[in-house]
Image (tube, helix red, strand yellow):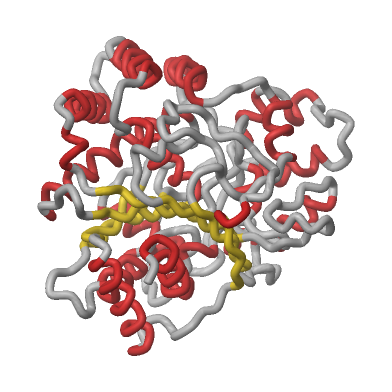
């Protein structure tokens, strides 16, 4: 991908990523909250501080109430509605496994003495009440809990005179182009607030750690804040402004859009700290503008179970893959299947029209066959940045509500130290 990506969609390349990829197996290390755990995190925090890191932002959404695989779009353009088997055995079963479901925690969160709170509705609000409710419902299952944030914040700053700020950003979890663009604009505003509050400046660094679909937000943001002129960015701004002008009540994201437009016009990007990005199981979709971010790393839950020696590729064989998915036998199936062509459906005809306009700029779309072609390319590593393929040792047959088809491992508290060690080693060396 060129540095000035200009909103190009990522390609699905089956070629060997070479030295951009590493393969490791998960090792839990010291137990969470133990003295050895805190000491190890403190050492890593010192290394991050010496590299210029002043803030960490945990970017995440929620699978509760959301279309985890984006199968609604597949149904809308074909899927089982029209018997879209395309002559491929097992395809109907695969689509059935991907279809949205009602997600419920299998057990109350540890220490809970109260009844299970009502499930928040999409779109989610990035506020304390919603984050607390998700913590109570999910714990650390596909969710950056407050316990995770506090453990990371306290550990990293253990030996520092000035702490590394650690914040959570909860995305609204609307899984379509419009929802992700709104999320990228909201993330831009949240970063502006953090930079102001922490008095950060050029030469310092912020690390964005983004889980799953929320990793599409910094990918979009890398294109939105990239220096230089962009005809596609201008067209996107014009499209968003035109559609917003037809609404009676302005949306919050429209103010973020105006702030971003002024930010670019005044060249404020030069005074920003560098944005380093770590994605966790983010499906490959939007391309990255590497001029818009600092260092880039992708972590993916992956078990090389192919028989052809191409261990950087996921397995995509029908109908066997349907039987493997609940056990997460091949790793993260959300990363593998929620690729181009998948999406939740917008709530209103007006939003669908705007979503279609954005799609023209962001993602080539040729119907159901487009998704099928992209899914069968089974690539694990995006074209940009380094990639760490990790066997999280989670193929244990636990309920899908707990494993999320191999997508829940990244936010587990017992993975915090392991992941942070590898992030610091790859991004900051030493």
Whether residue 28 is visible here, answered yes or no, is: yes
Instruction: Depth check: give the residue in front, 348 or 369.
Output: 369
Up/down of 354 relative to 185, above or below: above
Q: Tell which of 192 and 130 is nearer to you.
A: 192
Q: Quadrant of residue 374?
A: top right
**Any part of residue 65 in sight:** no
Say above or below: 302 vs 232.
Answer: below
Residue 385 spot, x, y in % from top left:
48, 49
What is the x, y in percent for residue 116? 43, 62
For the point 50% across and 62% down, the residue is 410
Which residue is found at the position 14% from the left and 26% from the top? 266
Residue 236 location in percent, x, y?
37, 19
Q: Is residue 334 left or right of residue 55?
A: right
Side of 74 relative to 300 (left or right)? right
Q: Which image quadrant is residue 310 in?
A: bottom right
Residue situated furthest bottom in the rendering: 35
Q: Nearer the viewer, residue 42 or 111?
A: 42
Q: Nearer the viewer, residue 120 or 414?
A: 414
Tell me which residue sits at (32%, 65%) in the image: 149
> What residue is rendered at 68% in x and 32% in y?
371
Quadrant including the C terminus:
bottom left
Label total for image: 0
Q: Which quadrant of the figure has residue 229? A: top left
Q: Is residue 241 above or below residue 408?
A: above
| Image coordinates for residue 118, horizontal then vertical, percent | 41, 53
């Amino acid at each position: 991908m060129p540095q000035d990506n200009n909103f190009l969609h990522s390609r699905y390349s089956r070629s060997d990523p070479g030295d951009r990829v590493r393969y490791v197996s998960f090792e839990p290390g010291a137990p969470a909250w133990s003295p050895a755990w805190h000491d190890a995190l403190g050492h890593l925090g010192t290394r991050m501080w010496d590299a210029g890191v002043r803030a960490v932002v945990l970017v995440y959404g929620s699978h509760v109430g959301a279309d985890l695989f984006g199968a609604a779009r597949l149904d809308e353009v074909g899927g089982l509605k029209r018997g879209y088997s395309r002559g491929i055995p097992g395809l109907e079963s695969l689509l059935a496994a991907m279809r949205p479901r009602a997600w419920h925690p299998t057990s109350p969160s540890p220490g809970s003495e109260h009844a299970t709170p009502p499930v928040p509705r999409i779109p989610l609000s990035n506020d304390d009440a919603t984050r607390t409710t998700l913590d109570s419902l999910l714990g650390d299952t596909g969710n950056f809990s407050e316990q995770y944030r506090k453990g990371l914040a306290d550990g990293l700053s253990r030996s520092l005179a000035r702490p590394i700020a650690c914040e959570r950003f909860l995305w609204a979890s609307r899984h379509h182009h419009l929802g992700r663009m709104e999320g990228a604009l909201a993330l831009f505003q949240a970063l502006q607030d953090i930079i102001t509050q922490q008095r950060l400046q050029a030469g310092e660094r912020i690390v964005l750690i983004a889980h799953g679909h929320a990793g599409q937000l910094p990918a979009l943001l890398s294109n939105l804040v990239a220096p230089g002129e962009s005809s596609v960015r201008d067209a996107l701004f014009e499209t968003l402004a035109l559609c917003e002008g037809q609404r009676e009540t302005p949306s919050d994201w429209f103010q973020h859009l105006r702030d971003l437009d002024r930010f670019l016009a005044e060249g404020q990007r030069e005074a920003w700290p560098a944005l380093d990005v770590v994605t966790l199981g983010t499906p490959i979709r939007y391309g990255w503008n590497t001029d818009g971010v600092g260092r880039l790393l992708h972590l993916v839950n992956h078990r090389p179970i192919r028989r052809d020696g191409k261990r950087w590729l996921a397995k995509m064989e029908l109908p066997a893959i349907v039987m493997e998915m609940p056990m997460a036998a091949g790793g993260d199936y959300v990363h593998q299947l929620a690729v181009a062509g998948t999406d939740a459906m917008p709530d209103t005809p007006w939003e669908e029209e705007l979503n279609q306009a954005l799609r023209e700029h962001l993602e080539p779309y040729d119907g159901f066959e487009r998704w099928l072609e992209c899914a069968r390319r089974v690539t694990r590593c995006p074209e940009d940045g380094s990639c760490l393929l990790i066997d999280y040792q989670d193929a244990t047959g636990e309920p899908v509500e707990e494993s999320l088809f191999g997508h829940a491992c990244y936010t587990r508290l017992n993975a915090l130290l392991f992941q942070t060690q590898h992030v610091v080693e790859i991004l900051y060396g030493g």
